[in-house]
Image (spheres, rainbow, N blue to C red):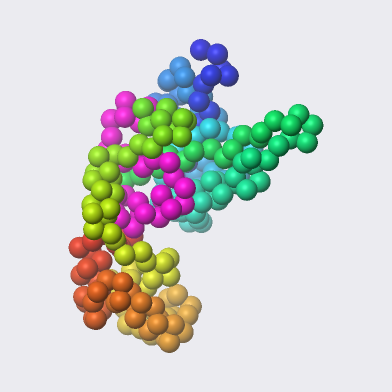
Amino acid sequence: MNTENRIRLLVCDDHAVVRAGLLALLGSADDIEVVGAAGSGEEAVAMTAKLKPQVVLMDLQLGDGIDGVEATRRITGRSAERGAARGADQGAERPGPPYVLVLTTYDTDADINRAIAAGATGYLLKAERPEELFAAVHAAARGRTTLSPPVASRVMAQLRTPVPHLTDREQDILAQLAQGLGNREIARALFISEATVKTHLGRIYAKLGVDTRSGAVAVAKERRLLRD
């Protein structure tokens, strides 16, 4: 196949064995050109800017540094400088940012919502079959959304019963609550004041419709709002 018609793909996963497996699998396709592999969010952002892939296959948990959601946000946010701007000499539109296809093991509401809000085009679970991955890459290259069935079910459930939106800071505090930490310990862990912790707790309680710490944790677990 003409290389001009092949989908330029960048893979980002912090596990070397998984990364190698994805490279071998995707590199075997005649219509996909794997242009690079990143082991961290920062590396993915930098390689995207340099290699200009059409699709970025993004894991969510990437060890130290920025996670896959933040990397996705930075990659898709490049539209401001690359999107509809026209070249000074040719007058042609520059290519927009690549589409990001999430490939992860995490399917909590919190992870799904954050990834979609960051600009992810699709959300696939690693348990899917190879042919589903190939189909999702092709769909992403055309700007079409692909969701693994469990993810699609959770999205539909959210549409029927909207899930409260928790800010990143509220998510952080909720995670500390789930570990049984008190206000003073949470404040120290997050480098904020106890007064700020109490303010955020009040907002969390209001959003979840509870009035106790244990109630907040129970509802968060039930509705899968806690980040893994």
Numbered marks: total: 0
Residue at the far top: name it: 1
Q: Position of residue 177 (x, y in %)?
A: 30, 74
Tell me which segment is drawn in magenta.
106-134
- Asked if residue 8 is among those painted magenta in the image, a careful observer would answer no
Name which residue lies at 45% across and 75% down: 190
Looking at the image, residue 72 lies above or below residue 64: above
Residue 196 visible in the snapshot: yes
Name which residue lies at 47% across and 80% down: 192
- Asked if residue 107 is among those painted magenta in the image, a careful observer would answer yes
Q: Quadrant of residue 91?
A: top right
Q: Position of residue 100 (x, y in %)?
A: 47, 41
Name which residue lies at 38% across and 84% down: 198
Q: Position of residue 160 (x, y in %)?
A: 23, 54
Residue 15 visible in the snapshot: no
Quadrant location, the C terminus: bottom left
Q: Quadrant of residue 183?
A: bottom left
Residue at the far right: name it: 89
Name which residue lies at 59% across and 38% down: 96
Q: Position of residue 134 (x, y in %)?
A: 37, 27
Looking at the image, residue 28 lies above or below residue 49: above
